[in-house]
Image: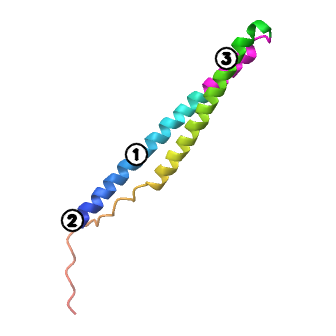
Amino acid sequence: MTHQDNEQAHADWLAESHRRAQASAFIWAERADEAYELARRFEDRAQSWTPKPAHRETIDSERAQSREQAALYTDARQLAEMWARVATVLVPPPAPLELVSFGPEPEPIDG
């Protein structure tokens, strides 16, 4: 394997790793959003019940589910942030510029 092949293999690996890290960050951010919405919904439902002894079990269950979703939100948000940082570190370098010719090479001037 030549040096150029090694460089290309590394560049390919870097680009694929960057893409995967971005995808992971996006997936975990979506999971965090979903968990946040569920936590909010459970808490809203818990607050909608009239605080009567007959409703205590339902209210407690809604609040427990809200806390569980809030914990999942925190974990998912932290993972999304971690993968976003990883993606930032793995940004592939720009492609090398190629020399473009705009016509035949000029004749050297003998002088």
Along the horizontal axis of the image, is 86 left or right of 1? right
Mark linked to residue 61:
3
Give how far across and how far down residue 40 sits, in percent.
66, 25
Give how far across and how far down residue 41 sits, in percent.
65, 21
When asked about the image quadrant of residue 66, the answer is top right
Looking at numbered disc 1 in the image, what kind of residue is underneath it? Answer: Arg
Reading the image, the residue beneath label 2 is 2
For label 1, the SS is: helix
Q: Earlier in the sequence, mark 2 or mark 3?
A: 2
For label 3, the SS is: helix
Along the horizontal axis of the image, is 69 left or right of 85? right
Give how far across and how far down residue 63 sits, in percent.
69, 21
- Spatial separation of the CA atoms under disc 2 and disc 1: 26 Å
For label 2, the SS is: loop
Along the line of sight, the residue nearer the viewer: 65 or 73? 65
Looking at numbered disc 3 in the image, what kind of residue is underneath it? Answer: Ser
Question: Up-down: is 8 above or below 17?
Answer: below
Answer yes or no: do the residues labelled 2 and 1 have beta carbons within 8 Å? no
Looking at numbered disc 2 in the image, what kind of residue is underneath it? Answer: Thr
Reading the image, the residue beneath label 1 is 19
Along the line of sight, the residue nearer the viewer: 56 or 73? 56
- x 58%, y 28%: residue: 35
Answer yes or no: do the residues labelled 2 and 3 have beta carbons within 8 Å? no
- Spatial separation of the CA atoms under disc 2 and disc 3: 63 Å
